[in-house]
Amino acid sequence: TNTNNQTMLSTISHPPNTTTTTNTSASHLLALLSEPDRTLQSLALQKLIHVVDSQWHEISEKLVDLEELAEDATVDAPTRQLASAVASRVFFHLDEPSQALRLALEAGEEYFNLYEKSLYNEAMLQAAMEAYTKERANEKKNLAGCKDEDGEEEEVLDGEKLRQVVEMMFQRCYRDGCYGHALGVAMEARSEEKFREVIQQVMSTNDDSIIQCELSYSLRALESCTSRTFRNVALKIMVEEGYDKCSAETLNRTQLFAALQLLDDPSAVGKALAELLGSSDDHLLLLGYQLCFDLVSDSGNPGFVEEVASALKEASGSSDNEEGDIKVELKPRFEKANKVLTGGFLGELNLQFLYKNSDSDPLIMKRLKKALEEKGGSRISALHNAAVVTHSFLNAGTTNDTFLRDDLAWFKKASNWARFSATASLGVIHANHTSEAMTLLQPYLPPSNNSSSGNTSDYAQGGALYALGLIHASTSIGAEARHSASQYLRGQLQEANTSSNEVLSHGAALGIGLAEFGSKNMSVCEELKDLLMNDSAVAGEAAGIGIGLVLCGANFNDDDPNSIIMSELLETIQNYAKETQHEKIIRGISIGIALIHYQKEESADAIIQEMKSSRDPILRYGAMYTLALAYVGTGSNSAVKQLLHCAVSDVNNDVRMASVIGLAFVLYKTPERVPELVKLLLESFNSHVRYAACLAVGIAMAGTGDELSLKLLEPMLDDMTDFVRQGAFLGSAFILMQCNGKTSAQFREKINSILTDKHVSMLTKMGAVLATGILDAGGRNVCLKLGQTSSSRGGGINFTSMPSVAGTVLFLQHWHWYPMMHMLSMAFQASPTYIFGLNKDFDFPKHFEVQCNAKPSMFAYPKRLEDKKEEAKKRVETVTLSTTAKNKAREMRKKKGDEVEGESDTNIVKKGDGDSSKMSVDELPTEQKKMDLDVNETAAPVEEKKRKRREQEPSTHVLTNPSRVTSSQIDFCAFDSKQRYAPINKQRPSGVIMLRDLTPGEEEEVGKVKSPSAENEADPPEPFEWAPPGHDDYIAPIDIDNPSEDSSSMDPKTDSDGDAKMESTENNNGTD
């Protein structure tokens, strides 16, 4: 036997010298694996490793033998490793990466070399990274005491060998300079040690381009990280190991500021701002102002902004104490920064833009009112209320309430809670107009103790308190104005509690929640909790929502003393929701809990699971909104999975509806995913699910004009259920916000047809009415945006807008309570779409321009409606035939005594015309002359119109400062580098842009930021010297009643004819 084996070995090792042929089968090698001799098996494996990539389908039949050989302890180690390598490659071709990885780890470095690039090695590397990530995730779950929900049995891998492979992968990335791959693996595996190691490796390169690129990549990648705990740790590592060690030339201060803002560290943000504001470089100073505007507008967290302002004040005080000479120079800079942070300057900008650039069409409301009156809609309270809300949406933030004051009798048709809502609509129209808030609402506010009781109803007074909160709800207005409004509302709340007036309590509670939005003021929460415990259904619902607004986005840190109080308050209202029998109170508390857990992510999982498991459907309803707000903008697969599960499994329609709408909040940063997810839900048998799917698509795709989304909603406009049609109208209106007239023309015609059809149901018509206001909201200068959806901060993070999210969620509660419709104004005021360039003095240069590389009609305002005037019907004159004219002419000649008939016939023939049947123009009857002249006059312009050629529309146009810039228009806009002013942030042509003057010595033409009440005031006179009567320089006053020729010629307000021009100084902001 030994002799035969040696012969066989020599034959295999040294084949006879024959013609070379390619073996197409490995059967002869596989036969050796069945031999008991280990030498033959080893030799066969040495040959199989070279042909396994081509003959793997044959070798797969011997996988069992290969695995047994690889696991046999009696076989020498090289043979076991070789068997593992062959089996691993077979499993790789069989598309079994986990089995292939298990055997590849046993094969060792000789057969699994990561430094050799091949398909097999790359596949094994990917499988190793997935296994390492799962192992790290399981470790985290075990530490947290969680169980694996999948329950899948996974292959047990050698952990030590797996970590060695991972380490080899990191070393390979360092060697090849692929730091992005290493960062991705570290973030996916949630490994703080590896993430720190990679950042240190990046900083050790001392290459500015690599450092900037990798830090920017890390910041963007952490945005999509679904673990808030790891994200905070990674951001701290980036700041400590990355940004703090960068040179002044390498450091990207915008990214550093974004990282500190995400860490929720107001003291660090304040120090960073103080460093910029104290710099001698004008560029850094303007960058500090720019970051102040970004801080207020992007996140919309007033509590955090106030803490930053306090930290900035402390940082500026410490820097001033070092050198007293610098204090006077730096003081104006810090005052300007505080003016932006807490002084309400951004609110003044928004108010001025919406007031001066409003394109609101007054004919929309006139026609809407006429249509409702003709079809009997004004007699239906819900439609009348919807029309009032539509008027407030159309003029949101513009302070234009002309229609309201002209048709005050029509608005007074509202009664009871409809009057509450109608009065509250004033707050939507005059949002941000804090200087005139009390004056505007004075006729409706509850009377003071010293004044008479007045004749306004409790509903109007409660609505006025709600309106006062809506005016002060924007996070861009001054802290002092919000505080004063809050103090007034708290006083009214106490009086309402004393008199047990639930209408006033309801309005005051909502107003306080809006005025104290995001402030985390615990004293206010205690007052609202006392109102909640009174067990009044209407007032209790407002109290629950008010607590949620005040504590929106609150952090429950162990170091913060208020955290214990907030936790106790949260537990108290949670228990009260289980005890009370009022559904309105339970719903208010549920929505309040959702607002409190805004962006809490995994920290909110415990309370979400508790609410989901409740038997009360209203608490499960609140759990869906809590889940949506906790993971808003994260795109978390776990959150999406839970929402979809409840959308198809819960027995309550409201819960299913809330779960579908929640998808829009979780996925708003990738909005194209929402229509794909809810496409099948739009065909659901459940009408509530279809309604929610329409709203989810509309909220996610708001302002995009997406054709595919509109096609999805188009069949829903004719759905068999009326409230589904209402949802389709609302969703389509959101999508078509700020689209040009051509894009939205078909939808506007559909709305008009619904409004003029008396057979349409009330809910459908109500949806069409509200869609009218949403389409042209805010004078066509605002759009619903839950946050930024593209990288517009120069590589920074896209922040979610807290007021936009809160306002949209509360607007959706109008399904249960119509006054919640006004909450949508919070989203409108948080996202006016404009570009506003400011210089270092906070004035806007009029010669700053932005180039838009698109046709003007692409982003133009829709055409205004034209008021058709009914023309008076004119009597049509009878046409006179030529024969009749000849007969009349003959009779006239006979009367004149003409004797010769032939001569008269020749005289009536037209000169140059051989047709004797035509009369001379002079001798035609007057009626015939008029008819001929009319024909000639009307024919002339037609010829001119045919000759005119249509001018070709330019492919680009220029935007002046300030101008409207829609979210879809941003991608087409660019800054002109040749102009005088250079923007500090060149990545984002929208919002407030700080400008650097490249030629500061030249005179510049600028505009001042003014409130609407100051727009109508005359400018102060130029300096002059007054001379008394009798002096040589005395100028006599002009006699207005009898002006002389000299005075009229000197009067600048007279025209060339000497007639005085009367200027209208009508103030739309006065009270009726």
Image (tube, rainbow, N blue to C red):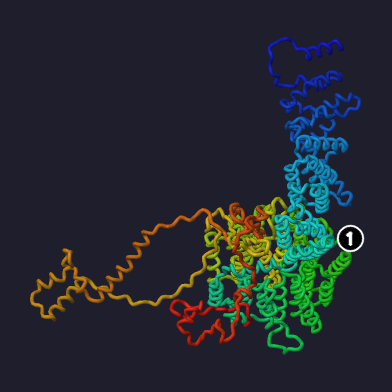
The answer to whether residue 558 is left or right of residue 276 is right
Residue shown at 86% from the left, 60% from the top: 557
Toward the right, the furthest residue is: 74
| Residue sitting nearer the eye, 291 or 497 | 291
* Residue 737, visible in the rendered structure: no
The answer to whether residue 182 is left or right of residue 945 is right
Question: Where residue 418 sits: x, y (%)?
Answer: 66, 78
Residue 172 occupies quadrant: top right
Q: What residue type is labelled 1?
A: Asp
| Residue sitting nearer the eye, 450 or 579 | 450
Numbered disc 1: secondary structure: loop
In the rendered picture of this protein, how many numbered marks are placed on residues? 1
* Residue 570, visible in the rendered structure: yes
- Which of the image's four quarters has the C terminus? bottom right
Q: Mark 1 points at which residue?
A: 558
| Residue sitting nearer the eye, 727 or 939 | 939
Whether residue 845 is situated above or below residue 955 in the rendered picture:
below
- Which of the image's four quarters has the N terminus? top right
Label 1: few (<14), some (14–19) or many (≥20) C-alpha neighbours in 10 Å: few
Question: Where residue 1017 sits: x, y (%)?
Answer: 61, 76
Residue 586 occupies quadrant: bottom right
Question: Where residue 660 sits: x, y (%)?
Answer: 70, 59
Toward the front, the furthest residue is: 1032
Question: Where residue 967 sits: x, y (%)?
Answer: 62, 58
